[in-house]
């Protein structure tokens, strides 16, 4: 059994404000080899890191990212909602996050939430990923949105893509059809047979989101290739 890669979901998000540079740096400090983050597009076309389509839950602002400019987004506090200790954390631009891989042994799983201008945003993303290619390994682009993945492929046929979803068997069919190297499967949608079938077709399996250590051990035993967790540092200590 090979040890799965442990991926920090939205950074070390159990302890730090999700999808911030602080959460990414803390994941890197704990030697997480991979970090998942989510991206949206601002009103003026900037790729920014946030999970929700609006800033309401994780900042002191309100409104849809698609209606806010990069400058408006930069002024928001993306840390205080988690704890006053984190006041002053900002919404990262994707470029700032990817730049962390220039000098650290980490790769990113960039989850595309929504491209308001698919061709333009996909080109921008591909260009950024090329500019910040990690020294070891490769970044991955993932999405629930098949069309967004195909737009990214049109922008750069060499980028590793992952289709996200809940039904492992259905995702594997999509991966085979479109030649995606990864399926990123909700943890309840994974079985040993599904993992074996994926591997038989050369497709790797990332399971999300697993925060319980005993559950992570179970997924490691059935042979998943990557485990995405809000508690990556704890999992790294337990799985090694
Ligand atoms: O990549 C796995 C996971 O991030 C997908 O769901 O809602 O946490 O982005 P969500
Ligand atoms: Mg995500």
Image (cartoon, rainbow, N blue to C red):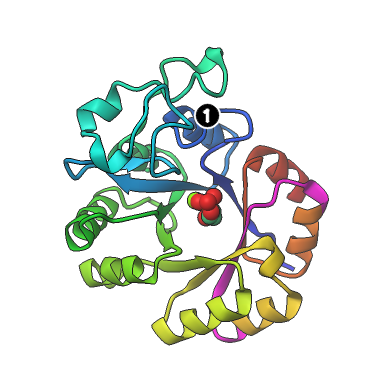
Residue 233: x and y, percent? 66, 38
Q: Nearer the viewer, residue 21 or 64?
A: 64
Residue 40: x and y, percent? 33, 47
Can residue 94 be seen in this snapshot?
Answer: no
Q: Residues within 10 Å of mark 1 (few under 14, many from 20)?
A: many
Which of the 4 image quadrants contains residue 117? bottom left
Q: Nearer the viewer, residue 96 or 151?
A: 151
Q: Residue at x 28, y 26 (%)?
A: 74
Under circle 1, the secondary element is loop
Which of the 4 image quadrants contains residue 127? bottom left
Horizontally, is 122 left or right of 169 in the view? left
Q: Which residue is mark 1?
A: 17
Q: Nearer the viewer, residue 186 or 29?
A: 186
Give the vertical position of 209 relative to 192 (above or below).
above
Horizontally, is 187 left or right of 108 in the view? right
Span colored in magenta:
200-214
Q: Residue at x 52, y 36 (%)?
A: 28
Asked whether 212 falls inside the magenta stretch, the response is yes
């Amino acid at each position: 059994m090979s040890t799965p890669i442990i991926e920090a979901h939205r950074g070390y998000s159990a302890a730090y404000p999700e999808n911030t540079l602080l959460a990414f740096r803390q994941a890197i400090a704990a030697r997480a080899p991979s970090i998942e983050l989510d991206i949206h597009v601002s009103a003026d076309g900037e790729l920014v890191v946030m999970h929700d389509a609006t800033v309401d839950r994780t900042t002191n602002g309100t409104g849809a990212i698609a209606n806010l400019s990069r400058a408006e987004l930069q002024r928001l506090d993306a840390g205080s909602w988690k704890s006053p200790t984190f006041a002053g954390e900002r919404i990262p631009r994707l470029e700032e996050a990817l730049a962390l891989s220039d000098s650290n042994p980490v790769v990113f799983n960039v989850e595309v939430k929504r491209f308001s201008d698919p061709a333009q945003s996909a080109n921008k993303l591909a260009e950024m990923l090329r500019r910040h290619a990690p020294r070891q390994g490769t970044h991955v682009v993932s999405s629930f949105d098949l069309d967004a993945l195909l737009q990214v492929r049109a922008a750069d046929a060499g980028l590793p893509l992952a289709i996200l979803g809940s039904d492992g068997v259905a995702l594997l069919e999509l991966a085979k059809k479109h030649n995606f190297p990864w399926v990123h499967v909700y943890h309840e949608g994974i079985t040993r047979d599904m993992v074996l079938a994926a591997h038989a077709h050369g497709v790797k399996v990332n399971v999300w989101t697993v925060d319980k250590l005993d559950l992570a051990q179970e997924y490691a035993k059935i042979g998943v290739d990557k485990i995405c967790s809000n508690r990556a540092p704890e999992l790294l200590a337990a799985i090694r």
